[in-house]
Image (spheres, grey):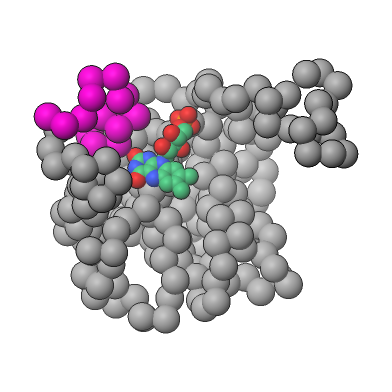
Amino acid sequence: MPATGDATAAFDPARLAMPIGEAMFSQRAIRRLRPDPIPMADVRAMLEAAVKAPSGGNQQWARFLVLNDPERIREFGQLYHEAWWAKRRDIEGWSGPQDIPAGATVARSAMRLAGEIGAAPLIVLVLAEPPGPANSVITCAQNLMLAARALGIGSVPTTLHPDVMERVYALFDIPSRAVFHLCIPMGYPRGNFGPTARRPTAEVSYLNTWGAPVPWA
Ligand SMILES: Cc1cc2nc3c(=O)[nH]c(=O)nc-3n(C[C@H](O)[C@H](O)[C@H](O)COP(=O)(O)O)c2cc1C
């Protein structure tokens, strides 16, 4: 049975009280998920945060297809697995685990997710009504994932592959006009949140003129 929980009470933003710095600095890709169901009240909290994100002209094109039915997730998981390997074939020319270099830890972790996503307790497909440009939709996805972090729920943004899109749309009755952006598996982590490794801000930021250093460079 899909998880339910009390999602009908008025939403209280205080449920997302984690300091924003803590959420941002400890949010990392969580690909190993526990099977425990996510309460529907938490699903709602994440969606309430997602829709607060900005969009061009406040057009609010983003749409969220929430999957919590284990059987539907299992079916989708097979398509995700196929899509992940299709991407590897197209991009790296890999056709199986033996082709992934030993040091490619992100790829190995992503491969494991491709094998396990069918057992995730929750997946949110982020789509949009047309024209649904990415820059007005990704803002929502990041809010969704930060809210998840504040609730102790792990997530990772992922994509699919053209090979599977028709079947994904058919599986969930998604109208062909809808624009797909991200597939976000979610669940309580097997493992820990943050910290993350990123380039220093002084390396990626300029002041007033491209290439001009920031004061802490
Ligand atoms: C557009 C986009 C596509 C991504 N696609 C995948 C994916 O297909 N599979 C996956 O496991 N992770 C995917 N990721 C997650 C990234 O690998 C991850 O955010 C990045 O390695 C940083 O991880 P960290 O926050 O743990 O340091 C994607 C992230 C973005 C933003």
In the rendered image, the vertical position of residue 124 relative to residue 37, given as above or below: below
Instruction: Count up the numbered dots.
Output: 0
Could one spot residue 11 in this view of the protein? Answer: no
Residue 141: percent from the left, percent from the top? 53, 53
Please determine whether, in this image, residue 167 is positioned above or below residue 78. Answer: below
Image quarter of residue 115:
top left
Residue at 86% from the left image edge and 21% from the top image edge: 215
Q: Is residue 79 left or right of residue 60?
A: left
| Residue 54 included in the magenta stretch of the image | no
Which SS type dominates the magenta stretch?
helix
Front position in the image: 203 or 45: 203
| Quarter placement of the C terminus | top right
Residue 45 locus on image (x, y percent): 55, 52
**Is residue 147 rendered to the left or right of residue 82?**
right
Which quadrant would residue 134 be assigned to in this image? Answer: bottom right
| Quadrant position of residue 126 | bottom left
Rendering coords of residue 207 (x, y %): 84, 34
Residue at x 23%, y 20% (from the top left corner): 102
Magenta segment includes 108: yes
**Magenta-highlighted residues:** 98-114
- The residue under the point 46% across, 53% down is 43
Please state if 137 lies on the left or on the right of 58 as rendered.
left
Q: Eyeballing the image, is 68 above or below 153? A: below
Q: Is residue 212 visible?
A: yes
Residue closer to the observer: 95 or 5: 95
Whether residue 95 is situated above or below residue 213 in the rendered picture? below
Q: Is residue 71 left or right of residue 189?
A: left
Quarter holding the N terminus is bottom left
Q: Quadrant of ligand 1?
A: top left
Between 36 and 182, the one lying in front of the other is: 182
At horizontal 36% and vertical 80% (from top left) the residue drawn is: 176
